[in-house]
Image: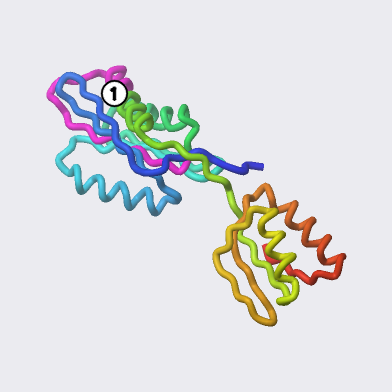
Amino acid sequence: MITSFKTIKSPAEGLYKEKGSKFIALAIPVTNLEEVEQNLDIIRKKYHDARHHCYAYILNAAADVYRANDDGEPNHSAGDPILGQIKSFNLTNVLVVVVRYFGGTKLGVSGLINAYKTSTRNALTEATLITRKITKEITILFPYQSTNEVMKLIGEVEMKITSQTFDSNCKIEGVIPVQNTESLQTKVELLNNLGVVLTLIA
């Protein structure tokens, strides 16, 4: 079971210059393909005068959605080196776009690979890396008299409350680390056996 993943906290930038060409690497945290497309649009507009906007991204906790794009550079000379750096930092939910301003001198394929790899590494080195726990949404329904037991349970399974309603029938919604799901289920069953009425919606 995947319980956490590494990503970047906020956007970061890296720069590499070679023979007059300038490579600006922009590392951006993203959570889905829609955010990838939105950020690509913003960068293409902002750096509209650049020769290439090469990029790569990895998405999901399992890092199972990814893509590399050379944007007109020779095959595998840009996107793959960018993707390789994201992988070597063991990151996901990250988009890196490298904007290239051509300086008039061709670098050759090996020169390009080095430029895209180095600029990406510079950006990721600048970034603040964070580990995010994978969470699961949970709803607990219970009568008001069970409030004390429920609040104790919430503390034990590290549940973060997102909304709560206290009435004759109470409802608490929140998220818990995915690795605590089984423990929560066991504790709820135990409390129910002791006469504390709880309903768990996962």
Q: Position of residue 201 (x, y in %)?
A: 69, 66
Compared with residue 60, is residue 109 higher up or lower down, i.e. above or below?
above
As rendered, which of 176 and 113 lies closer to the eye?
176
Residue designated by label 1: 115
Label 1: element kind = helix
Compared with residue 98, is residue 173 higher up or lower down, i.e. above or below?
below
Residue extending furthest toward the bottom = 168
Q: Residue at x 20, y 48 (%)?
A: 45
State yes or no: residue 112 in magenta.
yes
Circle 1 crowding by C-alpha within 10 Å: few under 14, some 14–19, many from 20: many
Image quarter (top left, top right, bottom left or bottom right) of the N terminus: top right
Q: Position of residue 43 (x, y in %)?
A: 25, 45
Give left or right: position of 149 versus 85. Answer: right
Q: Residue at x 66, y 56 (%)?
A: 155
Compared with residue 125, is residue 185 higher up or lower down, i.e. above or below?
below
As rendered, which of 27 and 188 lies closer to the eye?
188
Asked which quadrant contains residue 86, the reply is top left
Give left or right: position of 118 versus 146. Answer: left
Q: Position of residue 8 (x, y in %)?
A: 42, 40
Image quarter (top left, top right, bottom left or bottom right) of the C terminus: bottom right
Q: Residue at x 58, y 42 (%)?
A: 4
Amino acid type at circle 1 is: Ala
Asked which quadrant contains residue 199, the reply is bottom right
Give the magenta-colored segment's residue range: 92-114
As rendered, which of 167 and 54 lies closer to the eye?
167
